[in-house]
Image: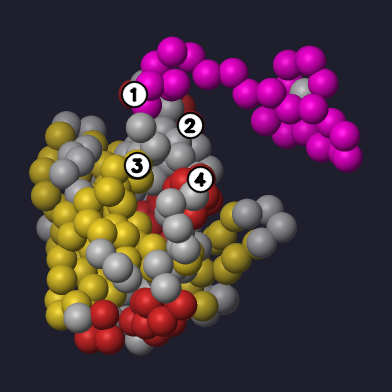
Amino acid sequence: MNGVKVGADCTLRPSDEVAYYMTTAEEGKQAFSVLYEDANITVVDKESGVNSEAVFAALSERGETYFIHRLDRNTQGLMVFGHTMSANEALLSCFKTHNVQKIYHALVFGTPPKVHSVEHAFLEKDARASHVRVNTRGRGVPIETEYEVLERRGETTLLKVTLHTGKTHQIRAHLAFLGLPVVGDEKYGDSARNKAFGAARQRLLAKQLTLTCPALGLTERTFLSPKEL
């Protein structure tokens, strides 16, 4: 910033000049790939480390685009965008009426006590700190997170996670609350274990997206990310 290297927490002021330097590997990395596209929607597979806003900006350069939902910067996987106002309204309605099923894969530290479970809790959001807290004492909004063990890998476990409520940081915070922090998650996870594991980014993948949106001619249309954790 202004020709001086700075850390992550600094305040920008009007007229400050910011430069970001990429390695050769970063320069060659693709931010996202398009899995499906028609006149109404585009489904993309976002890379980890890429802001959802950057994907939206890139698609907007190609034509009219509407933001429907977001993924955390370090969460990789599927996102859908609308291309017309009517498609935007239809997709938002489908998300609001729970006609969208989102399934994630998460690599976590620890071993769940059950092979399959549907967990209920409450989530409190601190918008200023960009942080949430999970509790079972009724504070905040109710959340429901379903998980299924896919593979045990020694000190880690690969989970299939189905969101029945989609709240901010729900998967990461809820799994951490259950004693199953996502590998590489520095906000809700275990920093010491992340460092020992060599995980700089969270191992969370938006693996599957199923849309039921008759207005767009989509009846239980399922999209899958080819990525694996």
Write the residue at 63% across / 23% down: 20
User: Does 58 sit left or right of 209 as displayed?
Assistant: right
**What x and y, as percent, mark residue 130?**
63, 54
Question: Do the residues under discs 2 and 1 have CB atoms within 8 angstroms?
Answer: no
Please give the residue where the numbered disc 1 appears in the rendered image: 197
User: Does 45 sit left or right of 83 as displayed?
Assistant: left
User: Does 157 sit left or right of 78 as displayed?
Assistant: left
Question: Do the residues under discs 1 and 3 have CB atoms within 8 angstroms?
Answer: no
Query: Which amino acid is tagged 3?
Result: Phe
What is the crowding at mark 2: few (fewer than 14 residues within 10 Å), some, or many (at least 20)? some
**What x and y, as percent, mark residue 220?**
15, 76
Using the image, determine if residue 195 lies above or below residue 227. Answer: above
Q: Is residue 25 visible?
A: yes
Farthest residue to the right: give it.
Answer: 14
**What x and y, as percent, mark residue 121?**
42, 72
Mark toward the start of the polypeptide (4 vs 2)? 4
